[in-house]
Image (cartoon, rainbow, N blue to C red):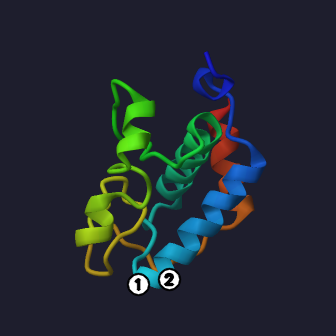
Amino acid sequence: MNSSENGTLASEKNLEAMRNFAETYAKRTNTYFCVDLSVTAVVIEGLAKHKDQLGCPLCPCRHYEDKEAEVNATFWNCPCVPMRERQECHCMLFLQRENDFAGQQQEISMAELAVVRSSLSA
């Protein structure tokens, strides 16, 4: 079993990469993070874990029978096809302004991520 699957956290390198990606993509698509930034933090952590495990940020909010096959199919690699085509994010990472759960932020600090990470590793 990969260490990322047994409860350890994603690498700092990929966490930072996924944070930067999420901020850049939100700004580019004029979408916003969830008003509850812990949702954003958990999704970014999940993307970073998948990048550690699979080399690709596979959507962390879905169940896969075969993650490697899903990575190769590319449909659920973030940003997934529904997000790219219709700006529909199942994970609630990238939300339209009119979405009831959309906050005002397009940025999240490493300190905010650290708070959520500490609760995940407890």
Residue 112, image x and y in percent? 67, 60
Q: Residue at x 35, y 44 (%)?
A: 73
Please determine whether, in this image, residue 21 is positioned above or below residue 120.
Answer: below
Residue type pointed to by label 1: Asn
Please name the residue that numbered disc 1 is placed on.
Answer: 30
Please determine whether, in this image, residue 102 is positioned above or below residue 58.
Answer: below
Residue type pointed to by label 2: Lys
Please name the residue that numbered disc 2 is placed on.
Answer: 27
Q: Are marks 2 and 1 in contact (CB under 8 Å)?
A: yes
Quarter of the figure with residue 52: top right
Quarter of the figure with residue 64: top left
Q: Residue at x 64, y 29 (%)?
A: 4
Residue 16, image x and y in percent? 71, 59
Check disc 1 and report its element: helix, strand or loop.
loop
Q: Residues within 10 Å of mark 2 (few under 14, many from 20)?
A: some
Residue 82 vs residue 36, the one in the foreground = 82
Q: Residues within 10 Å of mark 1 (few under 14, many from 20)?
A: some
Alpha carbon separation for disc pair 2 and 1: 5 Å
